[in-house]
Each structure stands twice: as structure tokens, then as C-alpha cells.
Amino acid sequence: MNKKVFALIMLFVGACIVAVFLISINNRSVQFCMDDDGFIEISVHVNSYKEIIKPYYCERDDTYYFFMPSVICDKKIYNDIENNEFIINQKKLNKYGVFEWGNGEVNKFVFSDKEVKVVFMESSDIATLFITTDTGDMENLNADKKNIEHGKVDIIEPNGTLSYSGGLSLTGRGNSTFKMFDKKPFNIKLDDSAGILGMESNKDWCLLANSWDYSYMNNKLAFDMASMAGFAYVPDAEYADVYFNGEYWGIYLVTEKVEVDDKRIDITDLKRKNQDVNPQVDITLAEKFDNGDTRGVILDNQPNDISGGYLLEKDYRLNAERYGEDRFVMTTSYFETYDYGTSINIKSPEYATEDEVNYIRQLTSEMEYAILASDGYSKEGKYYLDYIDLDSWVKWYMIAEIAYDLDKDGTNTYFYKDIDEKNTHFYMGPVWDYDCRFGGTYQYPSPEILTKLNKTGVWCCNLYDKTEFYDEVCRDWNVLFNDYLREDAQNKINIWQEQITQSVKMDNVRWYRGEGYPVEWPVSDNSSEFISEYSFEEQADHLRQWVETRRKFLDKYWGEK
């Protein structure tokens, strides 16, 4: 081989080595980098998408925490900072150097002549949402749940695949949860429909914070029980770690939104029909009417058939005069029943005409009168079973009773009706808002009380005394619910606990409810006593024990019949 050929070969080999080296640098998926303030952050490359993870400073232990999502399998972090004074645990980390972190280990970082404690915590095997707001912060969203923030989101599945990357809009959601907790729930609307976390494709989703729920599993348990019971629609829900603008915001339950849609509550979309017959007008901007006990919009035209579909929500907080302005929740379309003044929000069609409001008001009032009448008949001479689908109402009541939900039948009570051509009955559901149930509130209610949900509502309390309703409760208990609570519920709690334990630990540190941190919530109303210490393992055990005690107690009422 002559010298020229040898030189060319060596040049080629050298170029290949350099190329491989550069590629390896560029392909390093997790790197230390520097933020605008000159402090350390981490860049993560997933499927060619770059995300930023910022450290969270915890004042209680004077420590910076990096909360690492489950999509990061490799515990190696490569240094991409031009700084020869970057020292970790007394060892200098040069450019392109590698640091291997351990879950929960305390490290000493020296950077720019500043020494800090740094702890890395890893998530469970759940999905990750990286949300970036246009403003770059959360002030607008946290100030008022009516405020809208736009931005983008990358949704990464547990296996690392990207299920959505694109624009979205966000608003706050909830009532007491939004007002009382720093970790707030949100509604998100994707720019394009997408099937995320294994759920059906849609644009609208909810991020439930579970701030009331020390077990983080109450909503999952209620949804799972409803699925077992055979409800026509149950919101699908999956856990995910959520980051806002690079900051870890905690573990959330990503759920489908309660709405009329062919993949959700599959009834006639009267809102769409209203828009179709008024093509020259944006009905969301239509003039509104407010008669005090009815509200809606003024439209020139309405469909020929206004018998459905209606998605309704019973909520006493909608009545400002009765419950005070501080609890008042304004809705676009609304009515109060004729005889009892029950407050009903028309969720769909959200922009209902006066005829539509009056139609569903009359029908709901008739139903309510029949339910509350001792003989079960309305003024029109129709029996209460002529108005309701017994099966869905019984199962909805049983789930609320099992969960010890005294708010149900008063707030967050959804029911719906399709057009008469398809069905003339009111259906109860879907189940919703169970975060502080199953004995999981700070009051730790006894599982050995039969409530019949008579604290804030009257429908189920009266239905329970009717023969057909009570007999169906006993049948469903023996056929469905008893065995579910004895075996399936216990198994599901075990599975969910294992799935989310790591993320819950991160969430606890982020929101000061970590292992060993005091839970700043009173033991009972008007109490100066506080729960001394929080443990997720103990809360999961409490949920299991509470459910089993509840099952044995209810079996005395329903199992012997």
C-alpha cells in the first residue's frame, strides 16, 4: 500500500471517529445546561423534541429538587456547560462530562461559587405532559379560573412515544379546589383532536389535581366502579406528570371532559342544531336573557324538535339569592324548578333558547314533583318511572352512597335526556367529582353510616323509600357491587398504588405534603388540631380498610334482602 492511499484511509477513519463522537454528543438525551439567570437546569430530548426541567427549591429543607419524568430511563446526565468550576460531590464535571444520579440521594453542587444541596427524584411509569404557556408563567391562570392562557404541549406516553405535540388553551376549573389550593385543576383544549394516554380522540380534557385526596385514587375508584356497573358513559382517566414552563406541577389525573359528543355522552347535540339553524350568527355571542329563575340566549331560529338532547347539572351553588353571592356560579343557561326551586345548570346546549329552557324546566319540574310525591305521581298524573331510567339512577345513587358523598344530589349531579324519538327518560350520570370521598377527607367520616344522601339533596332520599328503587338497589348490590368491593376494588387500589407511588412522592415534596411533612389541615371542622404526619402508604391502607368496612356495613342493609 502506497503512502498516499494509507493517508487517505487514515483520514477517512479519523473523520468517522470525529463524526461518531459528535453524533454521540448531539444524541445525549439528558444534559445540564444554564438558564437565563445563570443557574443549572436540565434539557431533555425525547423523539427530537427538547424539553426543559427546572429545579424546584424547597425552603423547608433548603434543597433543590429535580423531578425526573418516567420517560428518562438513563440516569446519566451529560454536561453541556462551559464552566470548569462545576463541581458535584467534590468532583469537577468538565464539558461533556457525565454525572450519574441516584433516586433520592442528596448531592452537593458547587456552581458559580455557590454550594447547594440537590436531590433527584424519579417518577413512576406514567405519561408526561410538558406544557409551555405563551406568557411563560402561571400568574394569569392562577388569578382567576375564567382567564384563558394559550400555549403548546408535548404529551409523551409511558413508553416514550409522542402522542400529541401542538397548541392548546387552558383555563382553571373547579370551585373549592381552585380557590383553596395552590395546586389547581385545569381544563385544556388541544388545537387538534388527539387520542392521548390510550383514550379516545378529542380536543377537550381535564387535569384533576386531586388536592383534597390524600390517596390520589378516589376518582379512579369511582370511575372504575361506574364502568363495572355498566354506565353508558364513564369518563376515561389516566395519571400523568405535568410540567408547566419546565416546572414540575405534580401528578394529575387526565380525564375526559363531561360533554355531549359521539365519543362521550352520545345524545343529540342541540347546541350544534341551534348553530345550524342560525348560520349567520355565532350563537356564543348571542344576546342573553335573564329572568332570575331562567337564563339563556335570544336566537332568531330554533330546531323543530327541542325535546333533546340536554345535559343538565344539579347544583345548589347556582342560586345566588339563596346561598349568597360568594358561592354564586354564573352560567349561560339555567333554570329553577317550579315547585321546589332546585337550581339546574344547562350544560348542553350551553346557549339555549327561551323555549328550550322552558321546555326542559317543565319536564324536570314534573319529574322532581313525582319523585318527591309520596305516591310517586306528578301533577300531570305520570308515575316517577315514566320520567327516569331506573337502572342508571339506582347505580348512580349506590356509587355515591358507597363513597359516602354527602354533596351528591346537591352538587356535581349530572343527568341527561335525548330527543323523545330516541328516549323519553332522564338518565343519571356520569359520575364525577369524587376526590374527597371514600373516607378520604380530613374529617375521616365513619364508614358505618347510611346517608341516603339527605344532607344537601332530596331526590335520592325520597327515591330510596320507593319500592321499585329500593328493590333494585338490593339486586344490584348482590349481583354487582358487593363482589366488586370485596375483590376488584382492593386489587385495583394495589395496582394504582404501585403505579403512582414514585410520582406521589415527587408531588408531596412539590406541594409540601411529603413523607414526614405536617399535613396542614384540621382534623375536624373548627378544630385547632392538625394531622401530624402524612404517609401515602398509610393513606392507601386507610382507603382499603375503609372500603372493606363500608362493604360489610352496607351488606347488612342490602345483602339480606
Image: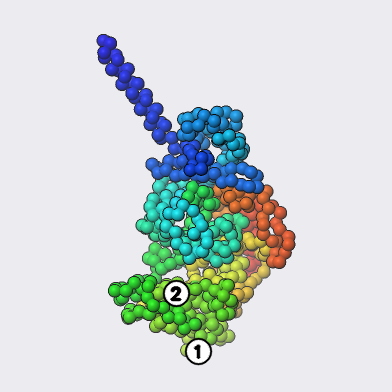
Q: Residue at x 49, y 51 (%)?
A: 244
What percent of the width, then of the height, locates residue 332? 45, 74
Q: Residue at x 58, y 34 (%)?
A: 113
Q: Please indicate, yes or no, whether residue 98 appears anywhere in the rendered image.
A: no
Q: CA distance from mark 1 to mark 2?
A: 29 Å
Mark 1: amino acid: Lys
- Dot 2 corresponds to which residue? 332
Task: Judge from the rendering whether residue 8 lies leftward or rightward of residue 121; answer left or right.
Answer: left
Front position in the image: 464 or 358: 358
What percent of the width, then of the height, locates residue 305? 34, 80
SS at mark 1?
Answer: loop
In the rendered image, the residue lying farthest to the top is 2
278 over 483 or under it: above or below: below
177 over 48 or under it: above or below: below
Q: Residue at x 61, y 47 (%)?
A: 58
Mark 2: amino acid: Thr
What percent of the width, then of the height, locates residue 517? 67, 50
Q: Please indicate, yes or no, whether residue 171 appears anywhere in the rendered image.
A: yes
Front position in the image: 382 or 557: 382
- Dot 1 corresponds to which residue? 379
Question: Which label sits in the foreground, 1 or 2?
Answer: 2
